[in-house]
Amino acid sequence: MRGAIRLFTIFGISIYIHITFLILPILFFISAGVKGIFLVFFVFSCVIMHELFHSLTAMRFGIKVGAITLFPIGGVASIKSLPEKPRQEFLIALAGPTFNILLSIILFYPLYKILGGEVLFNPSLQTWRHTFAYAFWVNPTLAMFNLLPAFPMDGGRILRAFLAQRLGLRRATQIAVGIGHFFALSFGLIGIVYGHFLLVIIAIFIYVAASGEGIQVEIKEGTIDDISRGKIKDA
Ligand SMILES: [Zn+2]
């Protein structure tokens, strides 16, 4: 991919970082010093693990994974083909958030003991203790956001896989794309009303990516038969 730097290869999957991602450590360093950089790299590691869980599950079903690329608003695992069976898509989609949920459960009690409830439930970048609390909330947030039942989030794939068994792939996709558009417009509206610029960008990303999922299935279903790669996108 253009503008992406290869970091390393694991399980035969190359991990790339998009050049725009480098804005994040700079921004966080300016606003919070070394604590900001720690947080960026923690998020970065969690997103890579999330994508690896998707990728390794896909590989178990014989689907080839090309690469994982990190963007400022999330990671993308490029897979060479779409899963054939809804059950496979369901398990592949579920694998990513499963990592975030597992890590949240593993980290909660030790951090609660070490930091205390007062700090753990008041995350900030003020002190290192508050920064570790901030880092804790990264995984529950990633899990919740990715499980929204709308394309292009994992929850949209889980919903599509569930509906596809009853309604067929095309109709199921249309519904998941429609819900994705609904979330995108809602986020966009909230972002504009409350002046959250980042939320507006995320809304645009979700809208475009949801549309892309719809087009991809239209291609797969017949009009153009030259689909060579699908994508698992995460916001
Ligand atoms: Zn995911």
Image: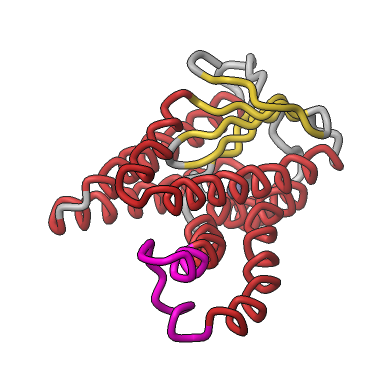
Q: Which residue lies at the image location 63% right of the left edge and 34% below the top edge?
A: 77
Q: In this figure, which colouring scheme has been used for the structure?
A: secondary structure
Q: Is residue 36 above or below residue 111?
A: above
Q: Residue at x 36, y 65 (%)?
A: 126
Q: Quadrant of residue 99?
A: bottom right
Q: Is residue 125 magenta?
A: yes
Q: How many marks?
A: 0
Position of residue 3 relative to residue 183, above or below, is above
Percent from the top left, x then y, of residue 226?
A: 63, 14
Report the residue at 31% width, 43% height from top: 30
Horizontal placement of 115 versus 77: left or right? left
Task: Answer with left or right where residue 97 lies relative to residue 21.
Answer: right
Measured along the vertical axis of the image, is residue 178 above or below residue 131?
above
Q: Residue at x 82, y 37 (%)?
A: 59
Instruction: Please report the bounds of the magenta region as a residue range.
Output: 116-134
Q: Nearer the viewer, residue 176 or 22?
A: 22
Q: Is residue 146 magenta?
A: no
Residue 138 spot, x, y in % from top left: 51, 60
Q: Quadrant of the N terminus?
A: top right
Residue 50, position in %: x, y? 65, 49
